[in-house]
Image: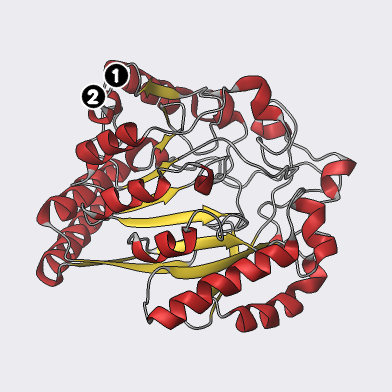
Amino acid sequence: MRKTRKAVLIFEGIAEMARWTFTKKFHFSFDRVPYTLENVGFKKVLNTYITGMNVLFPRPKPFGWPVYIQIEPTNICNLRCPLCPTGSGESDKKLPKANMPLEMFKSIIDDLGDSLILIMLWGIGEPLINPETFDMIRYAKQKNIIVVLSTHGLLIDKRDNVDKILSCGLDELIVALDGGSEETYGQYRIGGDFNHLLDNIRLLTGEKKRRGVKLPRIEARFMVTKANEHEIPKVKEMVQELEVDVLTLRCCAPHEHGSMRKNIYLTPNDLDYLPKNPKYQVYAYNKQGHRINRHDSYFCHFQYWHPTVHASGNVTLCEQDYWGSACYGNLKEIPSIRKIWKSDHAVDLRQKKTKKKFGAFEVCTRCFNADMKGNTWTAERIDLYGK
């Protein structure tokens, strides 16, 4: 990057930091959904700016602390979705079943609460299976962090969950609505009940309306597949009756094969899930079903401000690193994510990432970000009631 361009970006960053400090508001977008964090303390503002400097001046030891973080409350799920590592049974062979203990979650917030802006509270399990998930949300909200939770929605009516969802301080609840009918929903959400899901959404939105509360914003997320893409118009009508706040149409990414990014391909079975409409495909594929490489110079921001913490305690470089091929450390062994984040081992991992790029770790060989046609897996957002 040219020096003049760096100077401009630094100046723009300082101006933006001054604006955040003056207004105490931080506006940003995640997966095409806008968020506003209010009453932002100066520590968060300063850390966000300092962490952003790693884009201009990459180095293996980050300047700051994570701004975004994905935390997995559990890797256990009661559905068998075929494109999910848990649903397909792959995780059973590689991971012990685990709920993240509340005390582990608290240690993360105690360490990073002054730097974090956003927590994505999900992973390869169903978050509502962990009975301490709502206690986690309440604890994080004490540090003024936006918390988003994603669920398959079938446990909303269990264990007083409706009241807990509406009273815990959660900012956004994403509910997986992956079909416009029982037939298409059941093809992917194996073990689920479409009508039960719809009843649960109505139960939640109805109680939210009765209480007159604005949060959480309720987002219906529709993952578009070849089987259900014809139902998009129907789903757009359905969500209005359900009275959710937002509908997002999510691209489908089928299982990919191949050991290196240059040779990633889909089998005929995988193509059964890929939507025909390119708008709803994360990647472009050639006629042979091989992924088209787009951005060989892709800059991986995950290593500087967006780690993932799995239910097992593994702190990893990437949210797609389910098996820990690029693991900074484990919170059971080193009970401080701050120590893990800037440890010698983490520095070594980032040095390897810088030198070998897509060949650094198993998860990097099939990098899910570098070849995306856009900058998010969400193809479309439709605001309904939460404007």
Question: Residue 145: percent from the left, percent from the top?
Answer: 28, 55
Residue 92: quadrant of the picture: top right
Residue in view at x 51 percent, y 48 percent: 128
Q: Is residue 64 visible?
A: no
The number of numbered discs placed on residues in the rendered structure image is 2
Q: Which residue is mark 2?
A: 339
Depicted 9 relative to depicted 254: above or below: below
Residue in view at x 34 percent, y 36 percent: 102
Residue in view at x 18 percent, y 52 percent: 44
* Lateral position of residue 273 relative to residue 91, left or right: right
Question: Residue 157: percent from the left, percent from the top?
Answer: 56, 60
What's under tag 2, amino acid-wise?
Answer: Lys
The disc placed on residue 334 is 1
The disc placed on residue 206 is none
Residue 195: quadrant of the picture: bottom right
Q: Compare residues 163 and 320 and report the one nearer the observer.
A: 163
Instruction: Assess whether mark 2 and mark 1 are in contact (beta carbons under 8 angstroms).
Output: yes
